[in-house]
Image: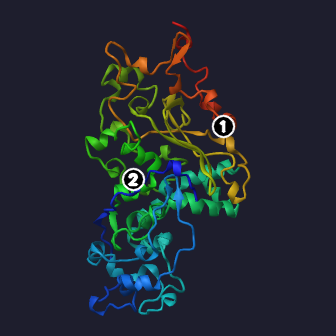
Amino acid sequence: MLRSKICSIPGLVLFVFLLSIMNSGCGKKGPIDPNEISVASCEGCHTDYAHLQAVYTPDTAAPAGGCGGEAPHFEPYDRVFMGGSGYEEYKTSGHYSIGCTGCHNGTDGTDDKQLAHSGDFLRHPSAEADDKCGSCHQQIVDNFKTSLHNGTGQMRKVAMRSGFDGAEDFNSLPQHQIEGYNANCATCHGTCGNCHIVRPPIGGGGLAKGHMFNKTPDMISVCVVCHTSRGGHAYLGVATGTEPDVHLTNQQYKCDACHSGAELHGDGMPVDQRYAYSKLPECENCHADLGTSNNYHSMHYDDFNCQVCHSQDYNNCGSCHIHGEGARIPSYMDYKIALNPIPDIKTGFKFTLVRRTLAAPDNWEKYGVDDYANFDVFPTYNFTTPHNLLRWTERTQVDQGKSCSSNCHIRNDEGTLVNKGLYLFDEDLLDWEKTASNPIIVDGELPASWFESN
């Protein structure tokens, strides 16, 4: 479990969990007669709060943790209670007619907790999505196998830094390392149910709204809970001195306004990493003629991505010791321009924004791997597109009579290199980062005139 308090954003996980919108299913079995419900049944037990309190088993495993800090705690009986408005809505849905054992297996019609959860009982049926979800949602299930929400991009980097070829080799890792991944990284990367029925483990786990299937996951209690320290932190304007993204303040856009179900579920085609995915939204989808809309765009449209001008400072942290000290480079706000780390994927840009990653040679030391076998295969800074866009930023808003270059270009002002901190130089790297990240530093890549004294 990552215990990095410095990356946590407590305010985000305190939002009210307001999951909504019914997802109709296809019926297979008749619904249980409400007049016959007793604690000697799945539904009767899980709608009787006092009974759940009487028979619950205390937690024995450590709570989930991740980049957003430790998960909020919900008691075991609260996580499985089906009562409330969500339950009433669930009873009118197609999924209700499937019946409890239709998805969870186990044994109905008993008040013996051990018997009810015996045999082939499944706590999370969507972990076996082909069997439990595929009969009605086969296309989504098939596509999701290669979805980045299924963790394929992250698995690829872990496998390649460990000396293997790609995500397909993830299961060749030492078993303890796989267990570490499942206990830490997979607290966000999960199953259908983690978005549509229960809170993600990093959000505390358990039923989010009775047992209602929510077609559209709630932005705060699902999306932001997993994307706390980067996406949510930026989009909501959490950090002191930052503002919420203009798409939130001006348009009230939620995540799914840009990130569609087709993107989130995948399209069945495996990709090495998220920026290679064909379904990603692009600025041009909404903003036409960007390349010629003003003089600055005309000059720089093909030089770097939009975020280089229109992002605010964004959250970084690094050197994670998984299940140990957490992020040993504490969370900090920064803004770095470097050479494009993925020019074969994001073509046309020489310079892009980059964000420090959690990678360190000894990430998995607590799981029996002293050092990665091939740590330097990737830089310690990733291509990034911060979700904190504004039209007027510290780069685009300049004093009257000056061009925006005064806030972006390096200039030698009587021996002081103004704006140098905006760029990633060799001197910014720690010793163990240099070999991995030297390919993207800007040393020798910027105009010599920028460094000449005025």
Left or right: 433, with 105 as reference point: right
Position in image of residue 167 (x %, y %): 60, 54
Which numbered disc flags the more N-terminal residue, 2 or 1?
Answer: 2
When asked about the image quadrant of residue 388, the answer is: top left
Label 2 amino acid? Leu
Give the residue drawn at x 32%, y 31%.
391
Q: Can see residue 244?
A: yes
Q: Can see residue 101?
A: no
Position in image of residue 429 (x %, y %): 63, 33
Residue 12, disc: 2
Position in image of residue 337 (x %, y %): 51, 29
Q: CA separation, marks 2 and 1?
A: 31 Å
Residue 13, disc: none
Nearer the viewer's eye, disc 2 or disc 1? 2
Residue 433, disc: 1
Mark 2: give few (<14), some (14-19) or many (20+) Cα within 10 Å: some
Left or right: 7, with 20 as reference point: right
Residue furthest toward the top? Answer: 454
- Give above or below for 225 relative to 124: above
Q: What element carries label 1?
A: helix
Count the labels in the image: 2
Q: What element carries label 2?
A: helix
Q: Do the residues labelled 2 and 1 touch (CB within 8 Å)?
A: no
> Which quadrant is home to the N terminus?
bottom right
When asked about the image quadrant of residue 39, the answer is: bottom left
Label 1 amino acid? Glu
